[in-house]
Image (cartoon, rainbow, N blue to C red):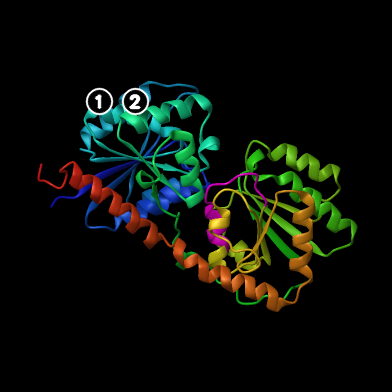
């Protein structure tokens, strides 16, 4: 039995959920005796994730993609497939539109695509049409990251449920710094981790902060992340005169110390897949307030391991006040339950589940044979 060569393809490796999942899966596969894992970034951006992967000994290909449709990427992926005798292509986000044609030309039959968001939000309409064609005619196998995501794949692409694998995202829970006290210091510390984009719904965070500041509440909120909405969000914060209670922390390569020092994690997104930042907060043992959207209700039980809300400022504000005003025993109850629930979202569970898919497909295509 020889090792199987797996190529994970992703647009880039910025600090975001799909990219962190790709990183974590690469670590798991790298330690396996069954696989050689390679990572392909369509762009040439070097980030904290690429530094960590390369330090770990995982080879990354940087393709230097131009803006818009860049068909040279298909040829570049084809060359990598041939040179490194790739057996399995595993795509993330919109990289499938380049990697699938390259794999067809190169004769690679095993094609896996992780769907990181609800199907209608993952791609534009035109890309969803391409994806539907690949699923139907090109043996592209979808993997959803929550049961709710599976539902959206079934509806959007007409794929029968039994043909959709479901694997929760996982992290190395040993990296989490477990919360050891639920007492509050001088200020109550909220934390939000996420790209500064429309999806993450920062506006209602600022609106809730404004209400609490007007009530002379003693608190601060850490906003970790960057993105296309950052300047607008900073401007709104200034206009609302809440800069003294909002801390813009930028991108953080290691969020665990900041999570540990915080008192509550909030995630009032408009839509979600299965956010890695939520798993990180759960693994820390933080009380959590999150929108009841996408895969989040598959992760958090309301009033048991967190508070689920509709993504509007009134519900967010009310829940933030509740977390602040309840005794420490309530925060401990939510946080410790979240910590226990996080066990199902371990890197080991995720990695083993993907290995099972790889092995099933490899056996189907007789890949476990000597060259």
Q: Tags 1 and 2 in contact by the CB under 8 Å rule?
A: yes
Q: Is residue 280 magenta?
A: yes
Residue 123: percent from the left, percent from the top?
51, 32
Q: How many numbered marks, from 0 up?
A: 2
What kind of element bears circle 1? Answer: helix
- Residue 13: which disc? none
- In the image shown, does 237 or 210 lie closer to the viewer? 210
Q: Is residue 350 visible?
A: yes
Which numbered disc flags the more N-terminal residue, 1 or 2? 2
Is 203 left or right of 276, judged from the image as shown? right
Q: Is residue 332 magenta?
A: no
Residue at position x 31%, y 29% from top? 137
Q: Which residue position holds label 1? A: 105
Label 1 vs label 2, nearer the camera: 1
Q: Which residue position holds label 2? A: 74
Is 51 left or right of 260, judged from the image as shown? left
Residue at position x 71%, y 77% from top? 328
Residue 39: percent from the left, percent from the top?
35, 42
Q: Is residue 51 visible?
A: no
Residue 238: percent from the left, percent from the top?
82, 44
- In the image shown, does 215 or 356 lie closer to the viewer? 356
Highlighted range, magenta: 268-281
């Amino acid at each position: 039995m020889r090792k199987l060569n797996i190529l994970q393809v992703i647009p880039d490796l910025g600090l975001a959920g799909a990219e962190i999942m790709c990183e974590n899966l690469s670590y798991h596969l790298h330690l396996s005796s069954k696989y050689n894992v390679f990572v392909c970034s369509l762009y040439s951006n070097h980030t904290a994730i690429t530094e960590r992967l390369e330090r770990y000994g995982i080879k990354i290909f940087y393709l230097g993609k131009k803006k818009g449709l860049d068909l040279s990427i298909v040829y570049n992926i084809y060359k990598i497939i041939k040179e490194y005798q790739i057996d399995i292509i595993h795509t993330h986000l919109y990289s499938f539109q380049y990697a699938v044609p390259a794999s067809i030309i190169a004769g690679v039959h095993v094609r896996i695509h992780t769907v990181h968001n609800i199907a209608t939000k993952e791609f534009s309409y035109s890309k969803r049409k391409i994806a539907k064609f690949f699923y139907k005619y090109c043996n592209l196998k979808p993997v959803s990251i929550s049961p709710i995501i599976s539902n959206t794949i079934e509806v959007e692409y007409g794929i029968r449920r039994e043909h959709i694998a479901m694997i929760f995202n996982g992290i190395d829970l040993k990296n989490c710094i477990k919360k050891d006290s639920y007492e509050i210091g001088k200020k109550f510390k909220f934390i939000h981790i996420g790209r500064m984009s429309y999806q993450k719904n920062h506006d209602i965070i600022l609106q809730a902060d404004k209400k609490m500041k007007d009530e002379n509440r003693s608190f601060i909120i850490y906003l970790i992340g960057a993105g296309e909405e950052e300047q607008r969000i900073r401007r709104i914060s200034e206009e609302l005169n809440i800069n003294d209670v909002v801390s813009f922390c930028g991108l953080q390569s290691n969020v665990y110390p900041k999570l540990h020092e915080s008192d509550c994690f909030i995630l009032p997104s408009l839509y979600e897949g299965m956010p890695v930042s939520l798993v990180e907060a759960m693994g820390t043992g933080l009380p959590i307030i999150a929108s009841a959207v996408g895969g989040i209700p598959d992760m958090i039980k309301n009033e048991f391991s967190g508070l689920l809300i509709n993504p509007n400022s009134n519900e967010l504000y009310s829940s933030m006040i509740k977390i602040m005003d309840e005794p420490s025993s309530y925060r401990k109850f939510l946080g410790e339950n979240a910590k226990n629930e996080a066990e199902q979202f371990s890197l080991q569970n995720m990695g083993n589940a993907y290995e099972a898919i790889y092995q099933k497909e490899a056996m189907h295509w007789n890949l476990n044979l000597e060259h």
